[in-house]
Image (cartoon, grey):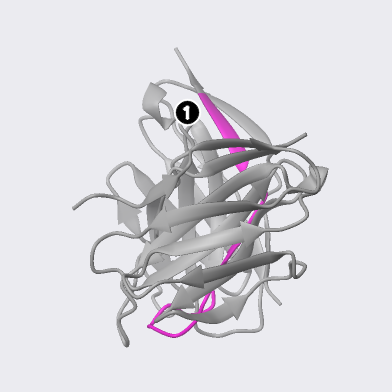
Amino acid sequence: KAGVTQTPRYLIKTRGQQVTLSCSPISGHRSVSWYQQTPGQGLQFLFEYFSETQRNKGNFPGRFSGRQFSNSRSEMNVSTLELGDSALYLCASRPWERDSYNEQFFGPGTRLTVL
Amino acid sequence: AQTVTQSQPEMSVQEAETVTLSCTYDTSESNYYLFWYKQPPSRQMILVIRQEAYKQQNATENRFSVNFQKAAKSFSLKISDSQLGDTAMYFCAFMKTNTGTASKLTFGTGTRLQVTL
């Protein structure tokens, strides 16, 4: 099976712009989570989607949003970019099976730089 | 809310030696999972080992083992016979639940491990 894929791998934007990042989960996985990784704040949970619905949300401003499509692919959007949004954005997928352990598999990440 | 603390920002170990990375956590939950993830310079986060809180037996995966002390809320990772490929950032992580329902990983700040010749 192919792993979790994220596109693009690198992105440079300027302050005030918006950006959309994409994540394709492992085939058969129905849950996608997003994490932000910065040197200052470390790894922080953004949100999780399952069945096209946001199931859990971290403590981020409303400028950060996401969605999931019927094929489980997910996108996250950041509007009105700030310098502090520069980070590695990681996506993780898992099967979503009740009553059993669901390992999360991470993608390679998208490195966003805001100038 | 859960917190995960890794007090060793950097560590170094010689090849073939053993190294232990420390992690403490705080939670009021009784059932949860603990993990060690490895993030090499390529940045792909890889699961090293997991521990279910209800299991008293410490988890092992080949050269990797944990010392899980539930009462002390301590979860250390021991790497035996260290290899150059073990060079990476290691993150300790907590998850309240995993069985289908919404859940999230709470990470520590990481320990940068350098394996030297």
Where is the C terminus of chain A found, in terms of image quarters? Answer: top right
Determine whether, in the image, residue A96 is placed left or right of residue A33. Answer: left
Spot occupied by residue B12 in the image (x, y as percentages of width and height): 57, 25
Question: At 63% from the left edge and 68% from the top edge, which residue is drawn?
Answer: A65
Spot occupied by residue B35 in the image (x, y as percentages of width and height): 47, 60
Determine whether, in the image, residue B116 is placed left or right of residue A82. Answer: left
Question: At 76% from the left edge and 50% from the top edge, which residue is drawn?
Answer: A81
Return the residue nearer the eye: A71 or A36: A71
Above/below status of B28 relative to A28: below
Which corner quadrant of the image does residue B80 belong to? top left
Return the residue nearer the eye: B49 or A7: A7
Q: Residue furthest front?
A: A17
Return the residue nearer the eye: B36 or B45: B45
Q: Main secondary structure of the magenta part?
A: loop
Q: Name the residue carrying label 1.
A: B87
Is residue B83 in view from this perspective?
Answer: no
Spot occupied by residue A106 in the image (x, y as percentages of width and height): 42, 53
Above/below status of B92 relative to B102: above
Which corner quadrant of the image does residue B18 belong to? top left
Q: Residue furthest top?
A: B117
Q: Which residues are magenta?
A: B95-114
Q: Chain of mark 1?
A: B
Return the residue nearer the eye: A71 or A86: A71
Is residue B74 in view from this perspective?
Answer: yes
Question: At 77% from the left edge and 44% from the top edge, which residue is drawn?
Answer: A40
Neighbor class of circle 1 (other Cα within 10 Å; few <14, some 14-19, many 20+) is some
SS under mark 1: loop
Spot occupied by residue A103 in the image (x, y as percentages of width and height): 35, 65
Q: Residue furthest left?
A: A1
For residue B16: magenta?
no
